[in-house]
Amino acid sequence: MKRLFTLIWVLVMLSNMSIAQDISTYTQRGLFPHTKQYEVGNQPVFNGVESFVLSQFPATSDYGVEIINEETDDLGFTHYRLKQTLNGIPIEKSMMLVHVKDGKVVSVNGEWFKQLPISETKNPSIREESALSAALDKVGAKTYIWQTEEAKARAQMRVTDGDVSFEIPKAELVYMNADNELDAKSLRLAYKFNIFAVDPFEIENVYVDANIGEVIFSVSQIHKNFITGEKSDPHPANSPVVKSPFLLANASATANTGYYGQRSITADRSGSYYYTRQSGARSIEVYDMNGATVPQNGSRPSGTTMSSSSSTFNYSGNKKYYLDAYWGAEVTIDFFKEKFNRNSYNNSGGKVDIFVNGSGQGASNNAFWYGSFAYFGNSTSGTPFTSLDVVSHEITHGVTQNSANLIYQGESGALNEAFSDIFGAYAEHYAGVGQKWTMGEYISFQRSMNNPNQHRQPDTYRGTYWASTSGADNGGVHTNSGVMNYWFYLVSEGGSGSNDNGNSFSVNGIGIEKASQIAYRALTRYLTSSSGYSAARTAVINSARDLYGSGSCEEAAATNAMHAVGVGSAFSGNCGGQSCDPLTGLSASNVTSSSATVSWNAVSGVSSYVLEYKASTASNYTSVNVSSSSRNLTGLSASTTYNVRVKYTCANGTVADYASISFTTQSGQTSCNALTGLSVSNVTTSGAQVSWNAVSGVSSYNVQYKPQSSSSYTSVTANSSSVTLSGLSSETAYDVRVNYTCSNGQTAAYASTTFSTSGSTGGGCDGIEAWSSAGYYDAGDRVVYNNKVYEALYFIYYYPPTDTRYWKYVSDCGSTNPTCDAVSGLSSSNVTQNSASISWNAVSGVSSYVLEYKKASDGSYSSQNVSSSSVSLTGLAANTSYNVRVKYTCSNGQQAAYSSITFTTEGGTTTCSAVTGLSVSSVTNNSAQISWNGVSGVSTYTLEYKATSDASFQSAQINGTSEPYTGLSPNTSYTIRVKYRCSNGQDSPYSTVTFTTSGGSGSCNGVPEYESGKYYFRGDRVVYQGNVYESQADYIYWSPAYGWWTYIGPCGSSATSFAIDDRERGVKLFPNPTRERVSLQFFAEEAQSNSIVRIFDASGRMTLEQSISINKGQNIVPIELPSLQPGLYTVHFEDNVTRLIIK
């Protein structure tokens, strides 16, 4: 008797309209519904794959079943991954996953065709050679792998290199959907070619209709990470399993990495040397290519295993960053094994070979995975692409290709990218380094997982920034990955708000450990090669149910996070079971050079906790059981960062995720420095607030203050890092100083500052606001200070109105006296070696002026009263800069603000002639080389340039005697002039030259060709493949083929451009505004090992000082911004001051 089984077509929630629509869509397109879930008690007995599938999924035509993979997991599930065949020919987009436990089928999911075309032929009507011709026309390359000299040599030898064939490609017959559309009606018999192009480099799978010769679909097999050049193996299912040919002598070693400092590693010890390779639980090897060319034919690169004569690998320059790749591979293989029981990327112990430091096409600003090896390139503007998140991202592509094998196109391609980002983030969490919710924070490309919109990625399915799945970047794989990235962040951390669909959401985070378990199971057990976001929703929900139970809070989090990103409805009802959340309030206090107290909020009903700690560079934690909610750690090392984590066991027997912190012990030195950040705010007529940066371990401070006219201080004790002074006198200048007692018993030096109380009227002055040290004022703003009205001369903050550089006195409060302005027209003339004439515009009614002057290098002025509006200064020193200022007394008795100038006396007999030899060479239609003879003792020249027809010159400072002049227009006259500053302080006469550019034939009207690796800024125009494009953002160096460029038109249109040399751009900050990190971008003529970047807040207090190394040429230097409060800051670097906004 035939046994009947009750099937329930499961929607994750019955009210889930998007999933219901998905099932309906599958049915309408001739497929079985994507997911079948069998009720407990009605699960069919599993008697083999073919028997089960053919009986439960009868199609309109007979078909075959091919087993691709079979795996049993830690939960006791056996997962079968299947392919559907018709007429013995595989259906390319079919894949079914059958999930079996305890001999019964629990669920089935995937893409399985029900309406099979009976009439579909199995015999092609056109020849394979004709189909290949159509495929090659689609790729359109100049050179293919079988046309190279190497290919010819190998063909003669009848050998191949791994999976790379050097023969003309042979087709595989498949049934493929036209335009990749998942619809039974679009199935066609097709030739499938894997086309390997060398120039330009490309690998594509091209499908050609076997009956009419039409290309029906093609997909690139090169994965581009951060839209640069990441690529992966085009034949992941057939990737070779590479293992070490012999057992290595694994030994403990240390790597001084570039990004993460000192790290413990395992290395091979051979003789007296240590090598970056190991076998056993981890099978890894790192090769330095030493600048060799990265092969463009898919063959394995070659290089030298990195070595060290001691157990400490200690390199400089880029080479220290290559150690990060080795350590990062260790971390990645470790967490996949420890957390997910996965044995390397292919779950079979496959060896991971890593290559670094190559050259040639795709070698820089690049990282890629190819079968069983990875390549990590150098950066043309920063440090190599070897940070932990990038390394784990690449190796995870190997995991994906050996499990779900997500097609790198459209939604499945976006999921492919997202899962690599997810485990890149998890790697940083596992290792306790980096900013886990930012991908690529150490390199020039970034993606934000907690705020995808920050880098123009969507956080909602088909919401803002969603890219067309049929457009560039393989259908937006690097853009649309933001949706799944945000899902992972919400499941881990939780969040609430409203998405781009206007739907409100609330997600209770379950921690990154549980979130990663759900993500891994979804990737390896439920997703298929054609899965999109709807299938991903089903996959994560089923994974949460498998791991934590149906109706669990983990399932609720996975469901609600999908709802948050616009895929399906929210979880219905209350989640079951007792929550087991990480403890809260974990902190470190009383930190000394050798001890610290760690404490946390007690969990109700919990009497025992497990506390684990280690130095951040150590591999293993020390574990202690704690029966209270705090623990004193002793025996610590000075100046060392420690990682601490605490967990506990819940009443239901589950173990909570760790809560984690880090702290750094004190230096242990006996020095006792003055505190920093002393400032005064909230100043009134009788009080002020004094604050400073707290000193670690100090709980009491000695604060002293006095009027400046007094000789004795008043002392108060402060038990925090601020104190409020009261009972002060109005309109009085005060001195304040603060010190403390150090742990070694010494007393720190005083930190000191001054301030003045406001006038007794308390401001107001007919509605004019009182000046505030925390205020921001624009030119023309008026304030009251010490019962007087002042007007800002420029945009200003912090500096008080008594500073005449930025403010001018207007009047007393309530006064009807006229404005008392500084004198105007102050100037110097008739300047010689030892004299100068000073004059100014006379002020009506004023008969006496005070003139003060001094050498610019002196501290005090000489003063004289002058009864006219001019004076002659004599007895001056030759070749010397002087400061002069003039003031007078107004009719109301007030002193006018100073008016000031500076001049330089002549240098005696020194002559100052124009430069010689100014000439123009190498003139093209858009550029020219300018050069001149150097002047002895002169290193910097002013070069001014313009089109001869223009009214004004542009100027640049040049350190040298030649300079390229680029971005010019064809057939145009230009004028160049050069001068310099003489030793006597005067400017030399100009030397001038005029030239005309050549004609514009073939130059696209002067617009320069796109240059790989060069940075372009918003508005820059380039020629690419005969067309003009304009950049839509700053700091773009990828070609117009990858987005962020606007198509202007073909060459010969009216497009023009004048490209500004990067060296003239000064210092740029990006992003700005920012929150946690900013990068400085600048051009340097020479390398420098120790340059200082300083950041000041609005009060003028320095909040950060960092030493950086400068490379010759273009630089991009990341600066971390720890705990800076929102507001306006200034960044001081070399001679540049740039505003920075912290949001």
Image: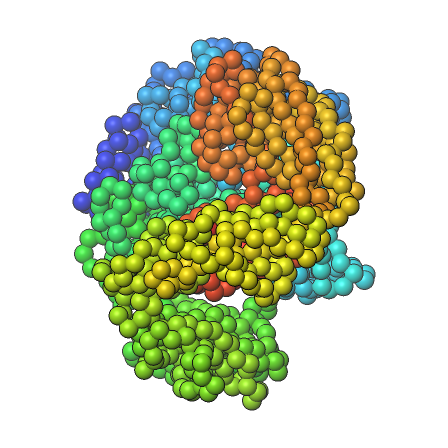
Residue ID at (50%, 51%): 869
Q: Would residue 389 appear left or right of 1111 to someone viewing this image?
A: left
In this view, the residue in front, 698 or 899, is 899
What percent of the width, then of the height, locates residue 1116? 57, 46
Residue ID at (62%, 55%): 873
Residue 690, picture quadrant: bottom left
Residue ID at (42%, 87%): 715
**Figure colour scheme:** rainbow
Location of residue 719 with respect to 762 vertically, above or below: below
What percent of the width, then of the height, locates residue 660? 44, 68
In this view, the residue in front, 199 or 708, is 708
Can residue 720 be seen at all in this image of the molecule?
Answer: yes
Q: Quadrant of the C terminus?
A: bottom left
Can residue 613 be seen at all in this image of the molecule?
Answer: no
What percent of the width, then of the height, locates residue 582? 36, 68
Residue ID at (64%, 15%): 998
